[in-house]
């Protein structure tokens, strides 16, 4: 681990701690899987509002697998892209019911064989349900890991594996929520608050912004 990576990790740990609890509400493994599918280009807060009733209407994997498409679309409409998400959820749960005995698998290969499940969604489930250290590369992690100089890769999968090489395994799950929290509060995409950021001394991108502002 390089000195730079160590400094970034120490500052993130000091600010946020090593918390690993997701911001999506769930009580069963398949609920987190479905909530994560719904969260694509949608806020976790909105997903939690929708799933509060959704998981009562469809209490298990079989009920989702047998759901009427139009009714499910109506139930998740406010999450956006509701048609594609409804199709993915039904097909995903149908496969879980038929091939996995109504259980969510833990391997990355099995998870990504499910409709609507890429590595990001699979790693969310692996991290929180099975407690397997995994790096979840969402838009925040992709953008901020680059700005912090943690990776030069630009493709999500390459970023994931690059960060796995550079970060200690006991920080893989924590870094996800640390960078997501940072991205939602300080290092926002449109208006990053570099002058207020606790990482400004170790952030290459932040240093450039502050240098220009001082001229």
Image: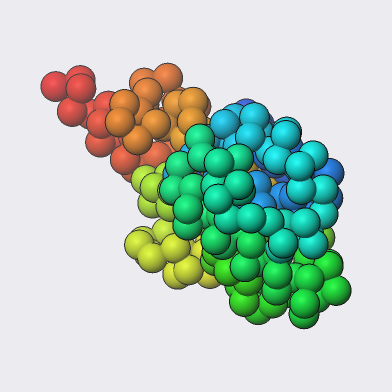
Q: Is residue 71 above or below residue 159?
A: above
Residue at 40 percent of width and 39 percent of height:
203
Relative image position of residue 154 (x, y in whole percent): 35, 62
- On the question of residue 41 being in view, the answer is yes
Q: How is the image coloured?
A: rainbow
Q: Position of residue 2 (x, y in %)?
A: 53, 57
Image-quadrant location for residue 192: top left
Residue 66 or 197: which is nearer the viewer? Answer: 66
Query: Closest to the observer: 117 or 211?
Result: 117
Quadrant where the N terminus is found in the figure? bottom right
Residue 178 visible within the image: no
Q: Residue at x 65, y 79 (%)?
A: 109
Quadrant of the rendered image containing residue 9: top right
* Image location of residue 39, percent across then percent down: 55, 45
The residue drawn where x is 78% and y is 71% is 97
Residue 59 percent across, percent down from the top left: 82, 48
Quarter occupied by the C terminus:
top left
In the figure, is residue 170 to the left or right of 160? right
**Residue located at (55% from left, 50% from top):** 70
Q: Is residue 124 left or right of residue 197?
A: right
Lateral position of residue 148 relative to residue 33, left or right:
left
């Amino acid at each position: 681990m390089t000195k730079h990576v160590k400094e970034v990790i120490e500052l993130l740990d000091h600010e946020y701690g090593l918390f690993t609890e997701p911001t999506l509400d769930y009580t069963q493994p398949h609920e987190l899987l479905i909530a994560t599918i719904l969260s694509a280009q949608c806020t976790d807060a909105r997903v939690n509002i929708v799933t509060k009733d959704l998981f009562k209407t469809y209490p298990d994997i079989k009920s989702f697998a047998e759901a009427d498409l139009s009714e499910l679309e109506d139930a998740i409409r406010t999450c956006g892209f509701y048609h594609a998400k409804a199709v993915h959820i039904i097909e995903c749960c149908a496969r879980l019911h038929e091939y996995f005995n109504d259980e969510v698998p833990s391997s990355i290969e099995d998870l990504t064989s499910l409709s609507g499940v890429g590595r990001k969604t699979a790693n969310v489930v692996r991290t929180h349900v099975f407690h397997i250290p995994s790096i979840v590369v969402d838009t925040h992690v992709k953008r901020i890991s680059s700005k912090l100089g943690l990776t030069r890769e630009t493709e999500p999968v390459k970023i994931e594996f690059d960060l796995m090489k550079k970060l200690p395994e006991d920080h893989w799950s924590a870094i996800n929520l640390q960078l997501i929290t940072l991205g939602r509060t300080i290092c926002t995409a449109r208006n990053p608050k570099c002058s207020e950021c606790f990482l400004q001394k170790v952030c290459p991108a932040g240093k450039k912004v502050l240098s220009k502002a001082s001229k």
